[in-house]
Amino acid sequence: MATADPIPDVTSATPQPSATLLVMAAAMPQDQFERLLANLAAGFPADTMLVATQNEFASSPFPSLRVIPAPHTNAAWTSTAADFVNTFQLAHEQNVRAVLMLGPGAGSLAPAALRSLADAVLSSGVDLAVPRYMLPPNAGLINSAILYPLTRALFATRIRFPQAIDLGLSFRMAERLAAAAQRFTTSNQADALIWPVNEAVVSGYSAEEHDVGLRALPQPAETDINAILSLVTGSLFADVEAKAAVWQRPRRLPPQRPLAEEPSRPESTAEVARMVESFRFAYSNLQEIWSLVLPPNSLLGLKRLSIADPTVFRMPETLWARIVFDFLIAYRLRTINRGHLLGALIPLYLAWVAGHINVTAAGTSSERHIEAVAAAFEADKPYMVSRWRWPDRFNS
Amino acid sequence: MLTMLAVILQSNPYEVAPPVYTDNASIWHHMSAALNQSLFRVLSLFIAVLPGILAFFVAIGIFSLIGMAISGTLRRVLTWLKFDERLARNRSNAEWTPSSSPTDLVARISFWACVLAGLIIGVAAFDTSYAAGAPLPISLLPYFTHAVGAILLLIAGNLIARFLARSVLIGAVNAQLQYARFLSLGVKWLVLVLTAAMVLDHLQVGGDIVELAFGILFGGIVLTLALAVGLGSRDLVSRSLENRVERSGERSPVHDGSASAPSETIRHF
C-alpha cells in the first residue's frame, strides 16, 4: 500500500556560483579603483572572482564583476591587523579558496602581475605570494636597511619586501594571519602591523616572491621619519622577540635570484651632507645613550664615521648589522626604555642612508649594496643567537 | 660686725650661728649621687626602648623574608604564565614601557611592599612599647612616616627627571635642535627642583622660606630657558625651523597612481 511520503519535497534554491578568489581592495581614489577593476576584469574570469572594496560605489563600470562592500579600516600605506581580520571573515563567509589583498595605488599593477600573485595561491599550492616591486634606488630605504636584512637573516627567506602592501593568501594563510591579528584587535590595536612572512615561516607554510614591476607605493600621511621608523622597527622587533624559539634554529636560505639591474642615481650632495651633519650632531649628544646599547667596537666604528668626510661617508655593512642586532638585544633586555631605544636608532639609520646614497652614486647597483648588507646580517647571526641566549656574557 | 648681725637676726639671742662652709666629702658625694641618678635615668630609658628597637628590627626582618618568598613565588608563577609575552601582545605602544620586564617589576614591587609593611609595623611596635615604657612627649611615628613618604617622593622625582631628560634629549636631537642638551638639562633640573620643594614641604621643613625659594628658583629656570630659546638663540631656532620646513617639503607624500615616473626624493618607506 502506498503511503504518503512523510518527508516533504524540499526544493532547494539554485546555488550561486561560488567565487574561488576574493580580492580585498583597500580604500583608494576612484580613478585608481576603476583602473584596478579594469585590470582585474582583463586578468581574471569574472565568475571566479569577488571584489570587496572600501570605496563607495554606486554602479560599477564593469557589471560582470561582482563587487561587495568591505569594512572600513585605517590602512593608508600598509595593511593593518584589522585588514587581516576583515579579510578572513569575508573569505570565510564567501567560501573562497584564496585571497588577493591589494593596497592603495594597486591600480598601477599590471594585470599580469595580479594574475601571477593569484595563480601562485590558487594553482601552485603556495600559501603566501609576496610581490617584488621595482622601486627607485632611493625608495623603500627602511625596508632595505632593516626589514629585509633582518627578516632574511633570522627567518631564512629572500623575500625582498616582507611588509608588502599587496599579498596573495591561501585560505589557511588568511586564517593564520587573522589569528595573529586578532590578538591586537581584541586589545583595541586595530592599526598594529602584522608580519606575514614571519608568520608563514613559523607555521611552516610556503611563501614565494613574484616580480610585479613598477608600483606606486603609498606614503604614510605622517611624514615624520622618527614616528614611522619607531613604529615599523618596534613592531618588527616585538615580532622577532615573540618568535625567538623559531628563528634560533638553523635554516637553509633559498638560492639567490638574479639581481635586477637599474641605472645608478646621480649623487644628491645636499641630502648626504645634511644627513652626515645630523649624524655628527647625534654622535656628540647621544653617545652616552648609545654606549648603554652598543659594545666598544661599534662605538669605535661610529667614532671613525663621525670624522669621515661626507663625500666618502659610508657605514660598513658589518657595523650596521652589528648595530641593528645590538639594538634588538637591547629591546629584548629593556636596557633602556623602548621608546628611547628606537628614538636613538634613528640617527644611525640616517647615517646608513647617507652611506647608501654615496655607494649608489659611486656606481654600485643599489640592489647589490642591499644584498651585501643582507649577507652581513646573515654572517653575524651567530653573534645574535649567542647574545640572545647569554646576554650577560658579552657585557664589557 | 657679722656677729652683731647674726645676733640681731637670730631668734634666740643666745643661740650660736652655724659655720658658713660644709665638708668637701659631702660635695663629692652629692655630685656622684647626681651623676649616678642621671646615668640610671638614661639606662632606664634605654632599657625601656630596647624592646621597641628589637621589635622594630624583628618586624623588618620577618617581613623582608616574607617579601623575598612572595617575590620569588610571583616571579616563578608569572614566568610560567608567560606574563611578559601576553602583556607585550596587548601593549604595542612602546612609549611607556619600563626598562625592566613586567615580571621583574611585579616581583620587586611585592618585595619592597612587604619591606615597607614591615617598616610600618616595626615603627608602630616601637612607638607602642616606647610610649608604654616612658613618658616622653615626642612620638616618632608621624615624623617617620613623613620621612618614608619623602624618600618615596625623592625616588619618584629622580626617576621622572631622568626619564623626561632622556626623552627630551632624544626628541630634540632627532628634531635637529642645536640646544638639545641644554633643553634636556633644563627639564631635568626643573623636575628635580620641583621634587626637592615637594620633599621639604612634605617634611614640613623651612615653611614659607622653602616655598619662596622654590618659586624664585623655578621661575628663574623657566625664564632662563625661555630667554635662551626665544631671544638668545633666535638664529638657531629660525635655522632649525627652516630646515624642518625644507625637509617636510621634500618629504611630502607622492600620491601618484602612475608607476612609471621614479622620484628623485628620498623615500624611507
Image (cartoon, helix red, strand yellow):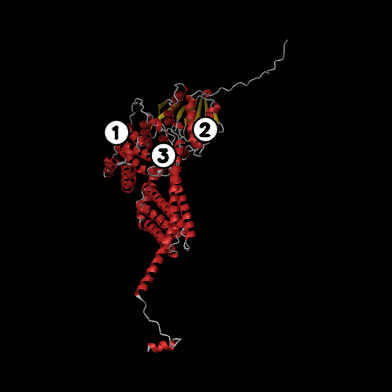
Q: Position of A221 compared to A389: left or right? A: right
Q: Is residue A343 above or below residue A125?
A: below
Q: Amino acid at mark 1?
A: Thr
Image x and y of residue A188, in percent: 51, 39
Q: Where is mark 3, residue-wise?
A: A234
Q: Position of A258 compared to A131: left or right? A: left
Q: Which chain letter goes with mark 3? A: A
Foreground residue, A106 or A233?
A233
Q: Are marks 1 and 2 in contact (CB under 8 Å)?
A: no
Q: Which chain letter goes with mark 2? A: A
Q: What residue is rendered at 41% in x and 41% in y? A: A230
How many other residues sit within 10 Å of disc 1, few (<14), some (14-19) or many (≥20)? some
Q: Which chain letter goes with mark 1? A: A
Q: Position of B221 compared to B129: left or right? A: left
How many other residues sit within 10 Å of disc 3, few (<14), some (14-19) or many (≥20)? many
The reply to whether residue B96 is visible in this rendering is no
User: In the rendering, which numbered label is found on residue A86?
Assistant: 2
Q: Where is mark 1, residue-wise?
A: A364
Q: Earlier in the sequence, mark 1 or mark 3?
A: 3
